[in-house]
Amino acid sequence: MSRRTPTAAVISLIAASALALSACSGTPAPSPTATGEADPQASAAIRLVLEPGNLDIRQTSGSALDQVLMDNVYQGLVSRTPDQDIVPSLASDWTVSPDGLTYTFTLQEGVTFHDGQELTPEDVVWTLTTRKESAEWTDSARLANVESITADGQDIVLTLAEPDSSLLWNLTGRAGVILKEGDEIDYQTAANGTGPFSLTSWRQGDSITLTRNDEYWGDAAQVAEVVFAYIPDNQAALNAALAGEVDVLTGFDANLKDQIEATGDFALVLGQSTDKGTLAFNSNAEPLDDQRVRQAIRQAINNESFIEAQASGEVQYGPIPALDPGYEDLSDVAPYDPAAARALLEEAGAEDLTLTLTIPNFYSTTVPQILVSDLNEVGITLEVESVDFSTWLNSVYVNQDYDLSFVLHTEARDFENWANPDYYFTYDNPEVQELYAESLAATDEEEAAALLQEAARIVSEDSAADWLYTGASVVAVGTNISGMPSTNVNERLNVAELGKSNG
């Protein structure tokens, strides 16, 4: 079974978790349509929350890096839409053999890197081979089932040791990013991709600027420049928008809807995401090694409270969000019922518990306050320990020294963590692990999804964690902006179709 390395996975998930804790309800609202004609020479400014530590797409994990560089600067053979569909990119098309062991991609012709060098089939073979063989490269383990990578003219052929239903999806991410063989750029501070934008500047602590690539092989970007401005504080971001300094606010707070829309220059847009507000349970130690205690905690928590507090939202009762394969409404498994929770605690001999919630300090107090109140109603005293991320990483992720922990896991299709007993979730169920392995080996998408759905129900019935809500893309979009994505923008933000008018 192919698995991503746990450290890479957790960094990727946590790096975007400073984004606003918000969710969506019902059908996502469309982005406003600009009333004026788009100006191809315009510069658009987009507020982001979390800045990457460096720009090395090979070895630095984190959604903060993907959000800016994936699709815009770097590309793979295939890509994904915000709605999670897999689409062609540097490959014009592809085929998969009936046995699921051979993937053949036809490489686009006439593609050049930003430095003017031609993209060749040899670049693709070298990049994917190096990724697979370099443990220090992010997501290298995602290519573990690939036995050989060869080129035949413009065709790139990947041969697998066994079927892997996740391969195409993996290739839409870091595992599939194509680089120039022999490139000597400093990846920490520079980039050389094939995308519609090239990296112009990075003012650390302030902004990253991308400029339209006029030699791009595909459709030209709609604006000449995009400036990603890093403004962590929502009130400061609101002030910048009202002052005309930014055109779009991502990671916004839906509670500020009236303020951002007051002038008529912005509209708040709610889009779906795969962000999972996860309350992890350490089931390796008492009393959380008892399923009854874990279920009692789940039934003591009113998930709807998080939606109300955030002024938007979707509840989530299992490990797979609605946008991912294998999703099922699992609200029947552990419904909100404080009386049932108290009965379970009594049955388990676990009354008058005191537990500690360890949470990174970049989160607001909303989640801890609701949890403290709800658990207190059933006789559980919850002590909140707010720590910096490095402390969380060491104590919770590495040493698994915690009772409860909350993190917003942003990455799509990450069920693999529930099939990995070494992951910080501490969940170890051989049946779930086998079902996940079978889903990877499935050659039919529907069969793979059905196996994930079966596994996810078991995870929820075991009360391996509590999934408090599905987070969302809460975006304030200027009325002079068109083509702004509104789905999953906390993970990746493709701005190639973004336009800006003068009116």
Image (tube, helix red, strand yellow):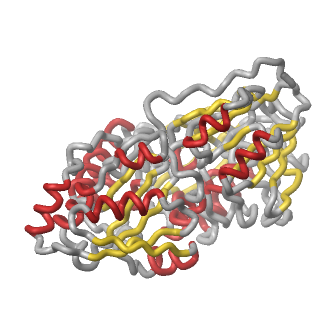
User: Is 344 on the left-hand or right-hand side of 26?
Assistant: left
Q: Position of residue 383 (x, y in %)?
A: 37, 74
Residue at the spot x=40%, y=78% of the render?
400
User: Is 148 on the left-hand or right-hand side of 40?
Assistant: left
Quadrant in the rendering for residue 217: top right
Q: Is residue 214 above or below residue 460?
A: above
Count how many numbered circles sit on residues in the image: 0
User: Is 456 on the left-hand or right-hand side of 249?
Assistant: left
Residue at the spot x=78%, y=46% of the render?
240
Quadrant in the rendering for residue 343: bottom left
Report whether residue 141 is seen: yes
Q: Position of residue 148 (x, y in %)?
A: 56, 56
Tell me the quarter of the image containing the C terminus. Answer: top right
- Closer to us: 109 or 488: 488
Q: Is residue 440 above or below residue 221?
A: below
Tell me the quarter of the image containing the N terminus. Answer: bottom left
Report whether residue 113 is seen: no
- Closer to us: 373 or 468: 373
Residue at the spot x=37%, y=67% of the render?
425
State the residue lying farthest toward the left: 347
Residue at the spot x=83%, y=18% of the render?
37
User: Is 356 on the left-hand or right-hand side of 176?
Assistant: left
Q: Position of residue 268 (x, y in %)?
A: 61, 33
Q: Position of residue 331 (x, y in %)?
A: 26, 43
- Closer to us: 130 or 297: 297
